[in-house]
Every structure is written in structure tokens, then in C-alpha cells.
Image (cartoon, rainbow, N blue to C red):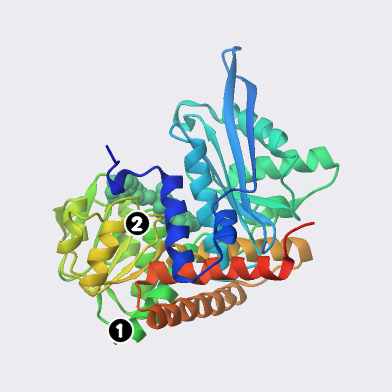
Amino acid sequence: MPKPKESLNPFEEAQEQIDRAGKKLNLAPDLLELLKHPKRELHVNFPVKMDDGHVKVFTGYRVQYNDARGPFKGGIRYHWNVSIDEVRALACWMTWKCAVMDIPYGGAKGGIICNPKEMSKSENERMTRRYASEISIIIGPEKDIPAPDVYTDGQTMSWIMDTISMQKGYTVSGVVTGKPIPIGGSLGRDEATARGAVYATREAAKRTKLNLKGATVAVQGFGNAGSHYARLIQDEYGAKVVAVSDSKGGIYSEKGFDPKQVLAYKEKTGSVVGFPGTKKITNEELLELPVDILSPAAMENQITSENAPRIKAKISAECANGPTTPEADDILYKNGVLVIPDILANGGGVTVSYFEWVQDLANFFWTKPEVDQKLEGVMVRAFDAVWKMHEEKKCDMRQAAYMVAINRVAEAYKWRGIYP
Ligand code: NAD
């Protein structure tokens, strides 16, 4: 029996997206075939001494999908559900994200099958350092630059940077991004994903003649991306945040509330739920609220063919990766909801990662206003390119973003040719 479309293996889904965009672009079939495969994959099985003295063998991956436009770039995920197909898909999507943002990187992704919630900090450090050592044969500032992803953070990046530096005998700060500021991190990296998404939302609002001042906003997922998004769109553009949520549920107030106060409340109580003056709602209800702007900023597959017909927002700005299924995309497009797709909307994160790497290589660090201004330039140019494709090809913004990205990678191949 054919699998339902919405439960495709993530890498098959990524390949299907390439096919669709490639055909619309009339790309040569052999080039399309090349783009549908990762260039290099490293599988590693390695031992880690656990706190109780026994040795546990972990499996990890680093997939280097494509480097036609520059060094490989992509995060490292620690999760019990990590699989090679998931890492392949994520590495593929990184390729398109870097290309659509027009930063000179290819795409990669790494992961370890593990449960970091059940590991002590010292076990996590030994696992990280051993994994870094195993993949050190293929990473480096000039070839492949990892970054944080699910359950990895600035501490993880610091251990990787230190491990590679110990091997080399000197400090190699440009080997990873997402580092803390004292060891070569960039100002503005913590809010970059959200700030980029807010710039993209502003551009979308201009095109759709939506006045951001007073526009109502609902944000699903009040974590790093979502909480900064809510704060920035309200404080810098005068929008009115009326709903936010986390894994425990959501809150709604027609009058709106201050996201900074909600963040302080969440830090104290562990959830946004219960914030004074708001009504409790479910995550499902949040998505269907009568708001101007919706930002899915939590998890994949939140907007599906089931709930898409009930989405009332005019703009959906995808801070999260993969929040909308392909079937839902078609419904939203038909209903006139402008979706700013993940590879564009949340591309501010990798863009400031790129800025971090540039600053590390130059050993010259920028001020926060310099970072923000450069990010704004990259976001506006990327949005313009995707908007133009969306109008020219009369397709939704996701397909347009893929077409812009795939076309840029194809262009690199045309110039470079096929070796030998
Ligand atoms: P995070 O862990 O800081 O926050 C996630 C938030 O979502 C938390 O508040 C959590 O409670 C909430 N959440 C979890 N399950 C939920 C559910 N079922 N319904 C509603 N909320 C739920 O993570 P983050 O870094 O903010 O990442 C969020 C999304 O943005 C992910 O898809 C991530 O891949 C994407 N993203 C993040 C960055 C970045 O720089 N942080 C960059 C690109 C993409």
C-alpha cells in the first residue's frame, strides 16, 4: 500500500521537493539526480566511559550534503530518534537554506543517537569530545562548520572547539558557530533567528498591505525562536501579541500582553500557562485564532491537511523547521495565507552563524548594531528574490524559495563543471 504523503520518510520528502522544484526550473535530469544525493556520509560508532564505570557504544553521523557554493554548514543534534535518513534530510535542507539566504555555504548535519536528558554533564562532555574527535577528519573552518541543534548548545560547541584545538595545538575558533561570546561567538546570535523572521514578516506585511502597527500575533512555541520573535515584533514594530504557547499549553488575551513579562513568568513557573489576565487555550486552538500573523515556532508537522482549512492568519512566518505539511501548504495557498517558508523565515540563524565564522576568521568582532544591519540586508535580499520567483512562477512561497535555492546551487555546478 502506498504510504500516506504526510508520513513520508523525511529524506524521501526532501528528494521529492527537489524533483518538484527542478522540474519547474527545467533543470537537466542528470543535475537533478546529483542534487538528490548527499556527497559524503560519515558513520561513527565510538565508546564512552559512563559515570558508573561501564563503557557504552554510541552511534553518530555527519552528513555532508553539498558544498558546490562553499564549506559545509549545519547543526549537530542529540536525540534518541536520530536516524541517518533524518540527518540526510536535515543536511539537504541546510543546503537550500544557505543558498536561499545567499551565504557562501553548502549544507551538512550531524547527530548522535542518545538521550542527553538521562546523561550527566560529564558523560555528555566525554561523548561530545569523542564524537568531535571521530568527525575531526572531515570538519574544519575551511571545510565543514557545525553548530547547535536539538539538545546541543553553546557548551557543546565549546567542547567541540576545544577538542579540535587540542588536536591541532592551537585555538581554532572558526570550526563551530553558536559559541559563547568569550570564545569567539557573535553578538546577536541568540536572537538572530527571530530577528530575521521579524524582518521577513515586515517584508511580507509590506507586500500584502498589512499594517504591522496593531496587527495581532500568535506564536506557537515560546522558546528561543518564539519568545524573541514575540518580543521583537511587538517592541520594534508595534504589533500586538495576543497568544503564545509552550509544550504545556497556550495563553490568549484579546487585549494582548507583554512578551517580556510572559518570559519572566515562564522562567519562574516553568510555563506560560497561568499568566495573569489570560485565558488558557490548547496548542491546536492557538493555530486557528483569528489573528493577522501566526508564527509556528515549536515543532514539525503542526499545520496539516486537517487543520489548515481553519487557519485564519494572513501571514504564517515559520520560525520552526517543517511546521507545515505539503498538503497543508496547498490548502493555505488556495486560501490566500502567505506562508514565509522555514528556509527563508528562520534563515537569520544560519546567517548570523556565518557572520560569527567571518568574525572568527578575521579576528575582528562587530557591534550588535552592525550585526543587525547586515542581517537585515541579507534577509531583505533573500525575501525579494523569493517574492519575485513567487510572482513570476505563480507558485507558493515555499516552492519559490526552493526554486531560488536549487537554481543557485545548479548555477554553481554550471560554472564549476563536472570533475575531471
Ligand atoms: P526551544 O527548545 O528553545 O523552544 C521550543 C519551544 O517549543 C519551547 O517553549 C517548548 O515548550 C515548545 N514546545 C515543544 N513542544 C511543543 C508543542 N507540541 N506545542 C507547542 N509548543 C511546544 O527551541 P528553538 O531553538 O526555539 O527552536 C524552535 C524551532 O525553531 C525548531 O523547529 C527549530 O528547528 C527552529 N529553529 C531554531 C533556530 C534557532 O536559532 N533557535 C534556528 C532555525 C530554526
Q: Is the C-beta of the residue carrying label 1 under 8 Å from the nearest atom of ligand 1?
A: no
Q: Earlier in the sequence, mark 2 or mark 1?
A: 1
Q: Secondary structure at mark 1?
A: loop
Q: Specify the label residue 263 is tagged with.
A: 2
Q: Nearer the viewer, residue 258 or 216?
A: 216
Q: Is the C-beta of the residue carrying label 2 under 8 Å from the nearest atom of ligand 1?
A: no
How busy is the neighbourhood of tag 1: few (under 14 within 10 Å), some, or many (20 plus)? few
Image depth: mark 2 or mark 1 in front: 1
How busy is the neighbourhood of tag 2: few (under 14 within 10 Å), some, or many (20 plus)? many
Q: Nearer the viewer, residue 302 or 16?
A: 16
Residue 390: image location, x then y, percent: 39, 78
Q: Quadrant of residue 168?
A: top right
Q: Is residue 203 shown above or below 416?
A: below
Q: Residue at x 38, y 54 (%)?
A: 322
Residue 273: image location, x then y, percent: 22, 50
Residue 386: image location, x then y, percent: 45, 76
Amino acid type for the residue under numbered disc 2: Leu
Q: Secondary structure at mark 2?
A: helix
Instruction: Name the residue at the right extreme.
Output: 169
Q: Which residue is mark 1?
A: 208
